[in-house]
Image: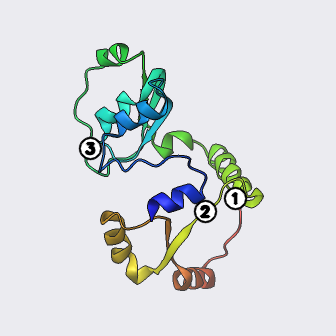
Amino acid sequence: MKAALSREAGADEMILYTESDFAVEVNRLTENRGLAAVYDSVGKATFEQSLACLKPRGTFVLYGSASGEVPAFDLIRLAALGSLYVTRPILKHYTLSRKELMQRAMSVFDAIASGALKLRIEHVYQLNEAAQAHRDLEARSTTGKLLIAFDHVHERISMNYQITSP
């Protein structure tokens, strides 16, 4: 199912990282040139292979740790692997001020409005179903965005406070 969704979203190739050595597949598909960037949300289980997918001066972006934290790493290996760049971005560092937060949020909203960014909302949970949303995420059985509806909470807040836009 995830492979079909990836194809629908425009992917040319899909590699099931739990079923094959994806570094070998990436290098085959790129004729051993490697990738300019790898975005890894898995972490520990994919770290080494993700690095092996990069071309010289490639960038590795670790933005999650679904399989656990990446172990300690000797930075000198980055030179041996092709002068690689590694980053571990955290949202709060990209939204240091309200102005920056609003600029970034508007960029995302504009991309959604223009159709350049398409969201796939898989399921909307009520607030009392939040635990199930977490279980679904942990089970890795989801393929789209999961939302938690705060409709009844918003109504109570609206009655007690004046809500204004920025």
- Find out whether the residues at labels 1 and 2 contact each other: C-beta distance under 8 Å: yes
Disc nearer the start of the sequence (3/2): 3
Badge count: 3
Figure quadrant of residue 130: bottom left
Is 43 or 30 nearer to us in this picture? 30
Mark 1 belongs to which amino acid? Ile
Position in image of residue 103 (x %, y %)? 69, 46
Label 2 is placed on what type of residue? Answer: Leu
Where is residue 56? Give x, y as percent.
Answer: 46, 18
Q: Residue at x 46, y 23 (%)?
A: 55
Q: Is residue 82 above or below residue 99?
A: above
User: Is 166 placed above or below 163 here?
Assistant: above
SS for dot 2: loop
Which of the two residues, 54 or 27, is positioned nearer the viewer here?
Answer: 27
Which labelled disc corresponds to residue 112?
1
Left or right, residue 152 beside residue 107: left
Q: Which residue is drawn at 41% across and 16% down?
A: 82
Q: In which quarter of the view is residue 61 placed?
A: top left
The residue pinned by badge 2 equals 119
Q: What element carries label 1?
A: helix
Classify the position of the C terminus by image quarter. Answer: bottom right
